[in-house]
Image (cartoon, helix red, strand yellow):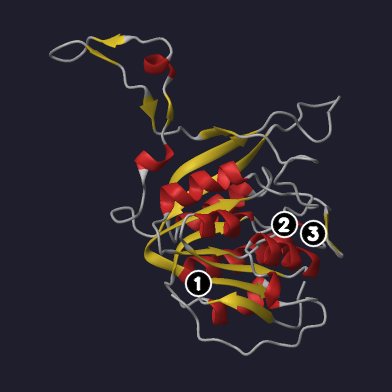
Amino acid sequence: MRSGRVREFGTDACRILHGDALEVLDDAVADGGADLVFADPPYNLGKRFGTTAESWPDEASYLAWTRRWLDLCVRKLAPTGSMYVMASTQAMPHVDLHLRGQVTILSRIVWHYDSSGIQARQRFGSLYEPILHAVADRARYTFNADAVLVEARTGARRRLVDHRGPAPRPYAATKVPGNVWQFPRVRYRMKEYEEHPAQKPEALLERVVLASSNAGDLVLDPFAGTFTTGAVAVRHGRRFVGVEREAQYVEVGLRRLGLVGAAEDVTDISRAPRRRPVG
């Protein structure tokens, strides 16, 4: 699972590291330097990512690897930082239990999508993926509620009146989203589609970035994939560090983040000079 080599592209405000997260994160981000971590790792379901098919000998080895990168991400989290972690439904209980002793888990989110990839006939097919929202300090963390408000059907559509207070008043037309998020999966021919087996929608990352970071904050994605996190973070004025080990996805990141001039061919570029950790 190791890359054996690290390449770096971009600027101090937007950086792509081509390498393995376990090998490069220590040098990429200072301990306590990341205001927001979004981690969407391989799920150990046998999918192929670029030139590599995810494969661990057994569940125990996969979970041991998971605990290593979780601990590393927690160490990189700022004292007021937030962390979102995705996992398979099978692995998430282990992730949840491991993180409880290190951070405070605020929400257990369900990302519900419109249809499963394979229509099951002998069981109930999966229509969701779990997400943990955790913070380093439950008394001090960023949550920009006004930036992620959604329609409240009670007030906006049904126009009901609340009679519980001193005087009747209409229910609010907007509200903070609950912990069930409904976003379509990224599909072929969608504008944001890239050739990746587990691409997450920009709408999901918009909610995460806007709710849990501010302009100028550092957003870290240790499994950047097609760099959706980076594209959203940069669009909203955040700094970004993304780690990805597959060259073809690094090339996607260079394009999506406007860094195409940084390298004509990722596979041939020599090792970049090492930088001091940011944060």
The spot of residue 103 in percent (x, y) is 43, 58
Alpha carbon separation for disc pair 2 and 3: 14 Å
- The part of the image, by quadrant, that contains residue 152 is top left
Query: Would you say 234 lies left or right of 249 here?
Result: left
Q: Earlier in the sequence, mark 3 or mark 1?
A: 1
Residue at 71% x, 49% y: name it.
Answer: 199
Report helix, strand or loop for mark 2.
loop
**In-image side of 20 versus 203 (left or right):** right
Q: Position of residue 212 (x, y in %)?
A: 42, 52
Q: Residue at the spot x=74%, y=40% of the render? A: 190
Mark 2 vs mark 3: which is more N-terminal? 2
Residue on which the image places disc 3: 58
* Badge 3: residue crowd in 10 Å (few <14, some 14–19, many ≥20): few
Query: Mark 1 is on which residue type?
Result: Ala
Q: Which residue is mark 1?
A: 13
Q: Is residue 173 above or below residue 255?
A: above
| CA separation in Å, label 2 and label 1 | 26 Å
Residue occupied by mark 2: 42
